[in-house]
Image: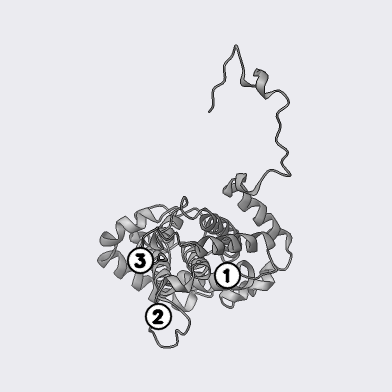
Amino acid sequence: MFTDRVDRPFISERDIAGARFDPSGFGMRLWSTRWYAWVVMSDLASRADWLDRLGGFALLGAGPTPWAGALDDDISALRNMAVHERAAALDDIVSEADEFISKFLHLVSATATTHPATSRMLIVADALTALITMHYKAHFNRPRPTQVVPGLMSPIQHGGHASYPSGHATQAHVFAALLTEVVPPSLGVPDPAPGAAGRTTIGKTLGALADRVARNREIAGLHYRSDTVAGVTLAAAITDKILLDRTYLPKFRELVDNARREWADTGVFAGGKDAQE
């Protein structure tokens, strides 16, 4: 809130009479990221082929209950996690309940202030991913683990939507993939793992964080392992077929390009080890 004098409003100042800007539009930087996400989501919603593009509902398995064959193993694993891991993981579970973009940014030494374009890309991706994931969740309509085994007693409430696929698993792996795409490989060291040609430890570490976020939801009794597996599959399709496709969503492509340009400037300090003599 900004105050103005009642007896002498600023607009009445003689020196500003006739002063005007001449903007060509509202300005991309002024758009709230929250509302710009709705703009990009409306572009996705207007594309009639996005579900088919992802592989339809069959992407996550055949039939109405593709998890049925894994249910007993899933429940056994959840019991074991609740007994042996939940107490130690509780801080992570609570901190990741609603927002964990900042955790991914923190992993690459970034914040919404230092890397606003990257932050905006992830926030918009989060909204797009949620829209798609909810469509799949509504189709499969799987009950949460605590609805099947109430003794699992999750330490926090579920989000008020169905279990399959895991939204946290989907979102986390989308974030990892996007950051791996925009952070230059030159900022990491080569991944020595077999078959990892061209990949750096940055991508490997982001993937490990995504796996951890997803597994914490299992430890909490909020998702089955089969929910997580489906979320990882969905995330790969979303990033490959929609978010990183250069022609499908031009507004999101621009967000990716802006984030990539942001990381091209590493912000070397004068006198640092990389400074030119």
Q: Is residue 117 above or below residue 264?
A: above
Q: Amino acid at mark 1?
A: Thr
**Residue 211 image-quadrant placement:** bottom left
- Name the quarter where the C terminus is drawn: bottom left
Q: Which mark is residue 239?
A: 1
Mark 3 or mark 1: whose residue is earlier in sequence = 1
Q: Amino acid at mark 3?
A: Lys
Mark 2 or mark 1: whose residue is earlier in sequence = 2
Q: Amino acid at mark 2?
A: Asp
Along the line of sight, the residue nearer the viewer: 3 or 127: 3
Query: Is residue 154 at least partly visible in the picture?
Result: no
Outermost residue to the front: 277
Which label lies toward us, 3 or 2?
3
Q: Is residue 152 left or right of residue 38?
A: left
Mark 1 surroundings: few (<14), some (14-19) or many (≥20) residues within 10 A:
some
Secondary-structure class at tag 1:
helix
Along the line of sight, the residue nearer the viewer: 127 or 263: 263
Which label lies toward us, 3 or 1?
3
Q: Which mark is residue 273?
A: 3
Q: Which residue is mark 2?
A: 191
Mark 2 vs 1: CB contact within 8 A: no
Q: Measure how far apart labels 3 and 1 are at the Cα level.
A: 36 Å
Count of marks placed on residues: 3
At which x and y percent is residue 242?
63, 68
Q: Measure how far apart labels 3 and 2 are at the Cα level.
A: 24 Å
